[in-house]
Amino acid sequence: MKESIRKAPVPLCGVALGMAALGNLLQSYSQGLRYSCGAVSGLLLILFLLKAVMFPQMIRQDMKNPVIASVAPAFPMALTQLSVYLQPWLGRGSYYLWLSALALHAALTVYFTWRFIFKLEMTQVFASYFVVYVGVAVGAVTAPAYGKEALGAKLVWFALAALAALLVLVTLRYLRFPCVEEAAQPLICIYTAPTSLCIVGYVQSVSQKSQTLLLALLGLSTGLYLFALFQAAKCLKLPFYPSFASFTFPFVITAIAARQAMDCLAAIGAPQPWLRPLALAETAVACFLTLSTLVRFLWFIFGKERETAPKKGGR
């Protein structure tokens, strides 16, 4: 068991985030499915916390790597979502858990900026940088549960500004330096996440909706989704790497964005019938990719699969 805990990689937090989001996506089908996904998410985070307690030196070493440090905020993002799951039992305590998760995300953002952005190397830029700066919008997604829509709206505007800047930076990196080591190639699938996350945060926390902005974000999200889906189809042929966590939350949040944008646009008098089949298709893809990735991670940690990922792919 100790060896399995040691093998739990930091990107496992991304799978936990994906499972928590998947539960929310499937909530309309079954509350039992939602809580099942939430329970799996919580267990994955506990496994990672055990590693942090038992092998802190490994975590400290991992955080010197820009790839791993950039996916580390998936941990507070997952906590942010799970706080809402726990609200019926924790009451006010879930609010403090939510605040603590946002504070941890902010601390990780400051650390990442100081260590990697101030000494920026284009070859060390990856799509996972979106997780650091746009990922905070998950606070806007969950803010209504605590009556903090005003804070959520501020997080959305920050995330949108970060999205605009990072789309330029990250895209330039991949265009100028297209060769990416195999272990980090799946990270490109994260491209589908940031715009979709901003859509969900916008719908949830911004009171005055702009039809033009929402449609523009939806168009960008759909285009990036198709690009990421094409990349995922190629990356699924690779041997397992912890960066496979990129197949989880990005595709789940895109399906959630399509459904929520559909409902929001209909409510403001601009229905988009094409969104319904798109949302259903994206839901099916999200379920397949997230659950299959979960199985691969569990086999990697608890099974006999050889550790194939070099240091830069996540440990």
Image (cartoon, rainbow, N blue to C red):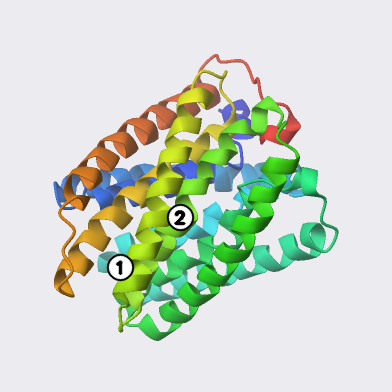
Residue at image coords 63%, 64%: 165
Residue 184 lies, with reference to residue 26, above or below; the image says above
The answer to whether residue 57 of the structure is visible from this angle is no
Residue at image coords 31%, 60%: 85
- Residue 305, horizontal then vertical, whole percent: 56, 15
Disc on the earlier residue, 2 or 1: 2
- Residue 117, horizontal then vertical, whole percent: 77, 61
User: Amino acid type of disc 1?
Assistant: Gln
Residue at image coords 73%, 35%: 312
Q: 25 or 87, which is in the foreground? A: 25
Q: Which mark is residue 78?
A: 2
Residue 15 lies, with reference to residue 157, above or below; the image says above
Q: 142 or 92, which is in the foreground? A: 142
Question: Could you give the CA–CA distance between mark 2 and mark 1, rounded to whole angstroms?
Answer: 14 Å
Residue occupied by mark 1: 87
Q: 284 or 160, which is in the foreground? A: 160
Asked whether, in this view, residue 210 is left or right of residue 312, the answer is: left
Secondary element type, mark 2 = helix
Residue neighbourhood size for the residue with mark 2, other residues' Cα within 10 Å, grouped as few (<14), some (14–19), many (≥20) = many
Quadrant assignment for the N terminus: top right
Q: 191 or 177, which is in the foreground? A: 177
Count numbered badges in the picture: 2
User: Amino acid type of disc 2?
Assistant: Ala
- Residue 217, horizontal then vertical, whole percent: 40, 62
Residue neighbourhood size for the residue with mark 1, other residues' Cα within 10 Å, grouped as few (<14), some (14–19), many (≥20) = some
Residue at image coords 30%, 83%: 207
Secondary element type, mark 1 = helix
- Residue 127, horizontal then vertical, whole percent: 61, 47
